[in-house]
């Protein structure tokens, strides 16, 4: 069932945002290349930056699973172009 709805992509972007588990970067590269709207994960070390197309309340509802996640609106990034949002996501939680 999943195979019928899935498609294979070769990553076309360079990302190195998950420092705690670098293998997770492979998943994010594919998701960005594919234009994915969602990533379903059980990995709780991922910090999310929610796009303005998603409800701001989503960040609050998932706070116990994804600590330090943010919504673009809380960062004053309403109507910010995607490349700028991606750059902010990359640098948001670097230590």
Image: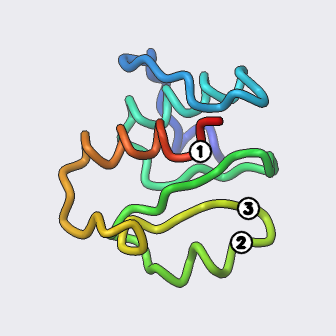
Label 3 CA crowd tier, 10 Å (few <14, some 14–19, many 20+):
some
Left or right of 50 in this view: 1: right
Point out residue 2 in the picture as x, y percentages from the top left corner: 64, 44
Mark 1 or mark 3, whichever is nearer to me: 1
| Tag 1–tag 2 contact (CB < 8 Å) | no
Left or right of 22 in this view: 14: left
Q: Give the SS element for disc 1.
A: loop
Residue at the spot x=57%, y=54% of the render? Answer: 48
| Tag 3–tag 2 contact (CB < 8 Å) | yes
Q: Give the SS element for disc 2.
A: loop
Residue at the spot x=56%, y=77% of the render? Answer: 58
Q: How far is disc 1 from disc 3 in space, using C-alphas?
A: 11 Å
With respect to residue 35, does 37 lie above or below?
below
The residue tagged 3 is 67
Left or right of 55 in this view: 62: right
Disc nearer the start of the sequence (1/3): 3
The residue tagged 1 is 93
With respect to residue 55, does 41 lie above or below?
above
Q: Give the SS element for disc 3.
A: loop
Residue at the spot x=59%, y=44% of the render? Answer: 93
Residue sitting nearer the eye, 38 or 91: 91
Q: How far is disc 3 from disc 2 in space, using C-alphas?
A: 5 Å
Which mark, by number, is residue 63?
A: 2
Residue at the spot x=60%, y=30% of the render? Answer: 27
């Amino acid at each position: 069932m999943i195979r019928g709805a899935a498609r294979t992509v070769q990553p076309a972007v360079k990302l190195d945002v998950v420092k705690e588990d670098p293998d997770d970067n492979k998943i994010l590269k594919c998701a960005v290349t594919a234009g994915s709207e969602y990533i379903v994960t059980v990995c709780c070390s991922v910090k999310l930056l929610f796009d303005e197309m998603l409800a701001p309340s989503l960040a609050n509802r998932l706070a116990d699973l994804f600590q330090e996640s943010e919504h673009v609106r809380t960062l004053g990034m309403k109507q910010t172009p995607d490349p700028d949002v991606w750059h902010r996501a990359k640098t948001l939680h670097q230590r």
